Image (tube, rainbow, N blue to C red):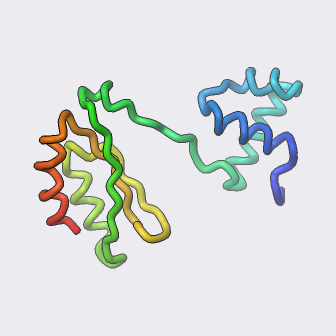
Amino acid sequence: MGFPDEKNLKIISLLEKDFRMSIAEIARFLSISHNAVKYRLNKLYKEGVISSYPCFLNAEKFGKRIQVIFLFDFPSESLNDAIVRLSGYDEIAKIFRTSGLYPVVAVGLFESKEELSSFIPVLSKQS
């Protein structure tokens, strides 16, 4: 495929603005058929141009008021063990492996600042 063409870039742009946009809406916006959009999306997935859609958590829907992003710099030899340990905490809603300075990113959900404050020392023991 090479670099995505103009229509594919428009599809990507539309999905970046609203990842819930339907294939029919994209087709109408770009004046192309439903099948053409579906074909292009499948090709973008297969070639790794699009790897996933974002999923944003609404802390209130989990009965929480505070959402926190934690960045961890675990040694590479202990990454898998660290991720397993983190996944055992109810406060941790999502865990991501990344490349770069912080190989593990986690999303925590908390009811209050006090709950967060008491959880941080627990996490400090993990790193």
Q: Is residue 69 above or below residue 66?
A: below
Q: Is residue 31 above or below residue 72?
A: above
Relative to 100, 57 lies left or right: left
Q: Residue at point 79% right, 44% down?
A: 9
Q: Quadrant of residue 77?
A: bottom left
Q: How far across and down, in percent of the image, does residue 105 sit? A: 38, 57
* Residue closer to the observer: 62 or 33: 62
Q: How far across and down, in percent of the image, does residue 82 sit? A: 26, 65
Q: Quadrant of residue 86?
A: bottom left
Q: Quadrant of residue 83?
A: bottom left
Q: Residue at point 60% right, 28% down?
A: 20
Q: Is residue 87 above or below residue 61?
A: below
Labels in figure, total: 0
Q: From this viewpoint, which residue is outermost toward the front?
A: 113
Q: Residue at point 49% right, 67% down?
A: 99
Q: Quadrant of the N terminus?
A: bottom right
* Residue closer to the observer: 14 or 77: 14
Relative to 78, 20 lies left or right: right
Q: Quadrant of the C terminus?
A: bottom left
Q: How far across and down, in percent of the image, does residue 65 sit? A: 26, 31
Q: Is residue 36 above or below residue 123?
A: above
Relative to 68, 38 lies left or right: right
Q: Residue at point 46% right, 63% down?
A: 98
